[in-house]
Amino acid sequence: MKRFGSYIRDCREKLNKESKGYSVRKVADKIGVEPAFLSKVERDIVPPPSEKKIIAIAKVLKEDPDILLAMAGKVSTDLLKIIQKRPVIFADLIRKLKKEPDHAVLKIVREVTDGDW
Amino acid sequence: MKRFGSYIRDCREKLNKESKGYSVRKVADKIGVEPAFLSKVERDIVPPPSEKKIIAIAKVLKEDPDILLAMAGKVSTDLLKIIQKRPVIFADLIRKLKKEPDHAVLKIVREVTDGDW
DNA sequence: AGTACTGTGTACTACATAGTACACAATAAG
DNA sequence: CTTATTGTGTACTATGTAGTACACAGTACT
């Protein structure tokens, strides 16, 4: 599987070709880190940055924060808080859904969304 | 809400009254930490220990690991890995279940368990 | 009275996390 | 040609994490 750094590098370079303004420096500025740091992150020389920075990167690069966080080996703290409030129920549910295929999980999501309880 | 330390202290003292052999030292030995450290943890002087130690504590004190981890502000890494493998689907589901009452979530768990797909 | 066990205070340490700050060489632009 | 921009190498730092090691006073045991 692809590493976090090389993935966001690809995203950034793609955007840079399309519309300019996505150099390491420009993006680093928008995110609020030093260019040298972003450069190292993109080459996977250092581990992925904090959740805050990852979410900022997602915003700038128009990527899904949950996917970037997952690639960084993290899970959004808002999800963690939801689980922590009802740890037994959610732990049980998630472990049971582990072996279920995508369409089964999606079916549940749809049911909840429709709200036919 | 109760803090992690005072909660496990209560659990340990309760067991100690029932059957002896649950002094700070004995339990610390079983868990694999220094007594002084467990003492500080139980008084919430230091933050809760690592996931590994928390799970060991749960085993020794016959408590639910997921609940202890939640009290420590953590989520079991096995759950995190499940989420990280399909971040979008699980993030979506969990956020949607946030406002749903327990019985609704439990209904889903039962459905999945019964496996009527 | 002496030994053993109890909980706890103090001091210290190793490693990880999350970056900053500055310098530099190569390339591109006016 | 010179100025700006680009990516990157090196060095450093502050804070957090996760404990260990030892000493010590109070209580319980015999």
Image (spheres, coloured by chain):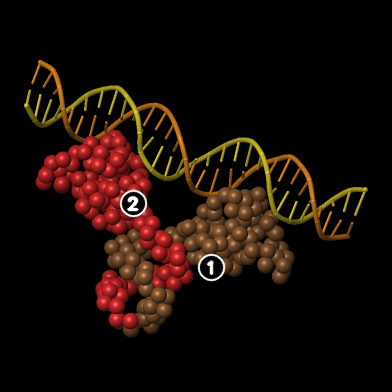
Chain colours: A red, B brown, C yellow, D orange
Residue B64 tag number: 1
Q: Residue at x 59, y 53 (%)?
A: B44
Q: Element under label 1?
A: loop
- Does residue A32 lie above or below B37 as drawn? above
| Chain on which label 2 sits | A
- Quadrant where the C terminus of chain B lies? bottom left
Q: Nearer the viewer, residue A71 or B10?
A: B10
Going by the numbered disc 2, the residue's amino acid type is: Ala
Q: Residue at x 30, y 51 (%)?
A: A55
Residue A48 visible somewhere in the drawing: no
Residue B13 rendering spot, x and y as whole percentages: 68, 64
- Does residue B13 lie above or below D3 as drawn? below
Q: Residues within 10 Å of mark 2 (few under 14, many from 20)?
A: some
Going by the numbered disc 1, the residue's amino acid type is: Asp
* Badge 1 and badge 2 both on one subunit: no
Instruction: Say whether residue A98 is left or right of residue D27.
Output: left
Instruction: Say whether residue A82 is left or right of residue B53.
Output: left
From the image, tell me which residue sits under label 2.
A72
Q: Nearer the viewer, residue D17 or B100?
A: B100
Residue A29 rendering spot, x and y as whole percentages: 25, 39
Tell me how far mark 1 sits from mark 2, CA to CA.
28 Å
Residue B58 rendering spot, x and y as whole percentages: 57, 64
- Does residue B65 lie above or below A25 as drawn? below
Residue B16 rendering spot, x and y as whole percentages: 70, 65
